[in-house]
Amino acid sequence: MRWALGLFLMFHGMIHGSYLLRQPVPKQGGPAWPFRVDRSWLFSGLGVDSTAVRMLGRQLAGLTVVGFLVAGSGLLLGQEWWRAAALVASICSLLLLILYYHSWLLLGMALSTALLIGLIWLDWPSSQLVGL
């Protein structure tokens, strides 16, 4: 179970790295790129400068990627602190996905929410389950 959860955390983090990539050239009739930090339903509505909106989005995306990679690595290495890293990464993930909302990213929101609930309220996964 430790390997499955550790690799999942790392993969979940890398998906957030899509916010840091250059948007691909749209194809005629193709879907819109959902990983955009140049627009935020909240900040754009408040008239926040677009440079600040992009910078905040990139910072949140970077923290999320690094946080999940650290959490997954810590879990794979049998470190107790992996939970703290996963908690911080989950919070950053939810902030990013909520502030830069796109309906395609609901699964990511659900996964990060489930991680938060599991880590905080359910004390999941147990140390025995992940072999710590």
Image (cartoon, grey):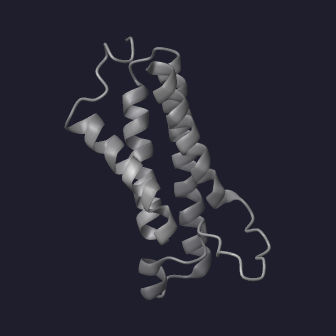
Front-lying residue, 48 or 89 = 89
Could you tell me which residue is drawn at 51 percent across and 66 percent down?
A: 104
Relative height, residue 47 to residue 88 (above, below): below
Could you tell me which residue is drawn at 42 percent across and 36 percent down?
A: 86
- Can residue 100 be seen in this snapshot? no
Could you tell me which residue is drawn at 65 percent across and 56 percent down?
A: 18
Residue 69 at x, y percent in the picture: 56, 35
Image quadrant holding the C terminus, namely: top left
Relative height, residue 31 to residue 124 (above, below): below
Residue 125 as seen in the image, left or right of residue 32: left
Residue 38 at x, y percent in the picture: 61, 75
Determine which quarter of the picture holds residue 95: bottom left
Determine which quarter of the picture holds residue 50: bottom right
Front-lying residue, 102 or 96 = 102
Residue 68 at x, y percent in the picture: 51, 38
- Can residue 85 be seen in this snapshot? yes
**Number of numbered markers:** 0
Residue 9 as seen in the image, left or right of residue 24: left
Could you tell me which residue is drawn at 43 percent across and 26 percent down?
A: 82
Determine which quarter of the picture holds residue 23: bottom right
Which residue is at the far left? 121
Image quadrant holding the N terminus, namely: top left
Which residue is at the far front? 29
Relative height, residue 79 to residue 109 (above, below): above
Relative height, residue 114 to residue 2 (above, below): below
